[in-house]
Image: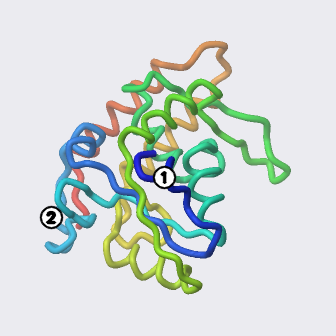
Amino acid sequence: MRDLEKHPPPTSFGLYFWWFEKRVIQKLLPKIKLAGYPEYSKGWIFREKWNLLYIGIGSNLKTRILACHFRGNANVSTLRMSLGCLLVIELGICLWKQPRLRDGEYRYTFGVEGEKKLSKWMAGNALVRLVETPDYEALEEKYIRQYAPLLNIDDNPRLFRPLKVLRSQLKECAKLKVDKPPWKCVKAAHERFKEQCRNYSSD
């Protein structure tokens, strides 16, 4: 993943920030109305051609960033789940229902091949920066509230609701009892997502 393959993260406490090029975001997300976002952030931080879309924390940055987000699967990474749901059409991947957990909830992943495609996409399109600090939990809340990155769902004061709805609808598609990927359901969910984005405002 650009600057992480040669220089793995440390095993210390800290925060991490996932950045994506502006051209990638324009392709990833339909044009949305951001009138309600603070002018200084517009829902993300802009530096040169990179935009901040996700903030996270870890008691072991190396494990959290590489093992969970980059080499893991959607079931253990909110970032992978969100990115994968946005990319199902482009990458030709599909969310699959996994065996129930003890609490009765299903797990969801993009399958072995789908997760490989997602990791490859992230390797070519993401940039990660990190900050080592023992105060990572308090700082995460502060930065999410300050910058409201579009891919952060929990504790985001300007929650990007179309994404949350898309994730939920694709999970419903995954529950269909079919032997092949439920593309009709998936494509319909994405069409609804694009329509919601066209009419979306953070106000």
Using residue 132 as the reference point, say whether residue 165 is left or right of it. Answer: left
Q: Which residue is mark 1?
A: 4
Q: Position of residue 184 (x, y in %)?
A: 45, 18
- The structure's colour scheme is rainbow
SS type, badge 2: loop
> Relative to 191, does residue 108 appear above or below in the rendering?
below
* 182 lies above or below 9: above
- Residue furthest right as drawn: 102
Disc 1 element: loop
Left or right: residue 107 versus residue 154 is right
Amino acid type of the residue tagged 1 in the rendering: Leu
Q: Residue drawn 55% across and 46% down?
A: 70
Mark number displayed over residue 28: none
Q: Earlier in the sequence, mark 2 or mark 1?
A: 1
Using the rendered view, name the quadrant where residue 135 is placed. Answer: bottom right
- Of the residues shown, which amino acid type is indicated by label 2? Ala
Task: Report the side of 18 relative to 44 (left or right).
Answer: right
Q: Position of residue 106 (x, y in %)?
A: 72, 42
